[in-house]
């Protein structure tokens, strides 16, 4: 599922908050991951540049320009496809 936020300033990765950014649990989607979200007007490709105390598990937080828009977004189900995991991800190696 997804929520939305509109905080200004720098994200956890150090870039300015802007359209095209999502916050995610770094244990699930490391910073730098590229994801595609399908959810009406919010459909598109996003980069994980932020984290948050309340962003845990399979939840993403989509950046939007205003708090009014964030409230209207609410919490909703989305389809999310990982296009690329961020550089801090660890690949489990198969033991033979």
Image: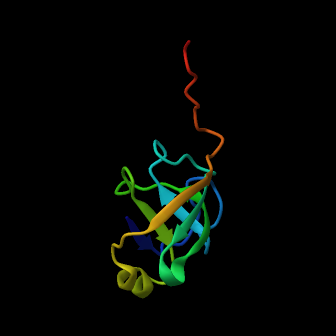
Q: Residue at 55% x, 54% y: name it.
A: 12
* Position of the C terminus by quadrant: top right
Q: Which one is nearer the viewer's eye here, 8 or 61?
A: 61
Left or right of residue 24: residue 76? left
Position of residue 29 measured from the top left corner of the image (x, y, whole percent) = 52, 48
Q: Tell me, what colour scheme is on the image? A: rainbow
Q: Residue at 64% x, 66% y: name it.
A: 16
Q: Residue at 53% x, 64% y: name it.
A: 22
* Position of the N terminus by quadrant: bottom left
32 to 69, vertically: above or below: above
Residue 23 visible in this rendered orientation of the protein = yes
Residue 65 visible in this rendered orientation of the protein = no
Residue that protrudes farthest toward the front in the picture: 96
Residue that protrudes farthest toward the top in the picture: 96
Left or right of residue 84: residue 12? left
Left or right of residue 32: residue 81? left
Position of residue 39 measured from the top left corner of the image (x, y, whole percent) = 48, 76
Q: Which one is nearer the viewer's eye here, 40 or 68?
A: 40
Position of residue 76 measured from the top left corner of the image (x, y, whole percent) = 35, 73
43 to 59, vertically: above or below: below
In this rendering, the count of numbered labels is 0
Q: Residue at 39% x, 53% y: name it.
A: 58
Rendering quarter of residue 35: bottom right
Rendering quarter of residue 4: bottom left
Q: Which one is nearer the viewer's eye here, 55 or 28?
A: 28
């Amino acid at each position: 599922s997804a929520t939305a936020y509109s905080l200004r300033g720098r994200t956890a990765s150090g870039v300015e908050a802007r359209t095209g950014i999502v916050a995610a649990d770094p244990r699930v989607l490391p910073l730098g991951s590229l994801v595609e979200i399908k959810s009406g007007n919010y459909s598109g490709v996003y980069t994980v540049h932020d984290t948050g105390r309340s962003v845990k598990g399979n939840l993403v937080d989509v950046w939007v320009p205003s708090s009014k828009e964030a409230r209207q977004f609410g919490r909703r189900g989305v389809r999310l496809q990982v296009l690329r995991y961020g550089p801090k991800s660890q690949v489990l190696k198969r033991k033979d």
